[in-house]
Amino acid sequence: MIDNMTEYIAEVRKIVSDRLDLTRELDDDDILNVINEIIKERSDESYISLSEKKEILDGVFNSMRGLDVLQPLVDDPSITEIMINGPHDVFIEQNGRLFKKDISFGSDEKLENVIQNIVSKVNRTVNESTPIVDARLQDGSRVNVVLPPIALNGPTVTIRKFPEDPMTVEQLIQYKSINHEVAEVLERMVKAKYNIFISGGTGSGKTTFLNALSNFIPHDERVITIEDSAELQIRGVDNLVRMESRNANIEGKGEITIRDLIKSSLRMRPERIIVGEVRGAEALDMLQAMNTGHDGSLSTGHSNSTRDMLSRLETMVLTGAQIPLDAIRQQIASAVDIIIQLSRLRDKSRRTMEICEVLDYKGGEIRLNTLYEFVELGEDGNNKIIGELRRTGNKIQKPEKFIAAGLSPEF
């Protein structure tokens, strides 16, 4: 029985490092073979159980090639979020609830080594002069890093995990985010090339919903995705171009922004442009793309309501251009066709709260036509919210795209 597994793993790791030829490029098998060799030698000296051997093998390998003590959490499909507040405080979200894990990186230096391992694999840089970075893991999980002196607790990492297989519309129905009727309407909207904006707060499921909607895109179309950190999982589209922004290098050069990518995408004969998330001045380029024949575009944004999303779009456009507010609102009203508002409710469930049609800009405001809205009916015995997405009775006021695509505008 090994008394202190953490110290034992560190000891074996040092022996592995001493024995490997670190001057040449090593593959995973080289490292695993040496670790197994050392474990065998040690087990000949004193008994090591099979479970302990596996723990040592995983611990040493993860510290050298994986994410150290973080790797088992990343590999666990039931964990949806990992929050690291310095080397000794690790929290996870599992089944919609937060828990503190009894694990530690041991030191700031060890945690920073893991961070550098993550960001270097996606050609990102994070250091004292640029202490904030967005990156991703190889499985597509979203990573945000903040280093000291900005992060007072020590290196801070937040990892948003996504399922290995993207969410389907059938699963959204199963989780009661939408119903069969809404799914059928959204399918026709995507096929008819309505420009759709998905809005909601942090953790409301915007990217997941966007992935599900992308399943309705006809397979023979050319689709271009643009993201800060690539995380969309679009399946079934052969003619797919994926682009990711790039931060400036240490000299402050080489930055490729979302705006740059949107402008470039317009020269690539796109049939649809999907922007993972609109956060700033690129909103203007996105709206202009929607207004210049690139119908069927999809995007997401942070907001607490559909009205709030319109206001945030106005603000984002104003950060990059001095345009009269009336002109901005006219652009938004003519570019965006549908806004889908998502929310994370108090029972941690993610629901579709509202589906609105954007009509026009009249009388100093953008007019909306609410097609569906969530009605809360109470709670069950387990504090789970009972509710459903209901038709408001309003008909769609701009059915032209349905008609052009040969689809029925009725629902």
Image (spheres, rainbow, N blue to C red):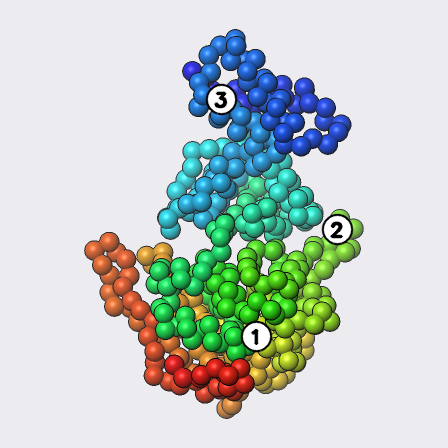
Q: SS class of the residue under badge 1? A: loop
Looking at the image, do the residues carrying marks 3 and 1 touch, with CB atoms under 8 Å apart?
no
Counting residues from the start of the chain, the first of labels 3 and 1 encountered is: 3
> Could you say which quadrant of the image residue 25 lies in?
top right
Q: Which residue is mark 1?
A: 296
Quadrant where the C terminus lies? bottom left
Residue 283 appears anywhere in the view: no
Residue 21 appears anywhere in the view: yes
Give the spatial CA distance, label 3 vs label 1. Answer: 54 Å
Counting residues from the start of the chain, the first of labels 3 and 2 encountered is: 3
Residue 131's spot in the image, x, y percent? 64, 47
What amino acid is labelled 1 in the image? Gly
Residue depicted at x 52% and y 65%: 214
Residue depicted at x 55% and y 57%: 233
Judge by depth and name the residue closer to the eye, 117 or 46: 46
Left or right: where 344 falls relative to 136: left
Q: Which residue is mark 2?
A: 249
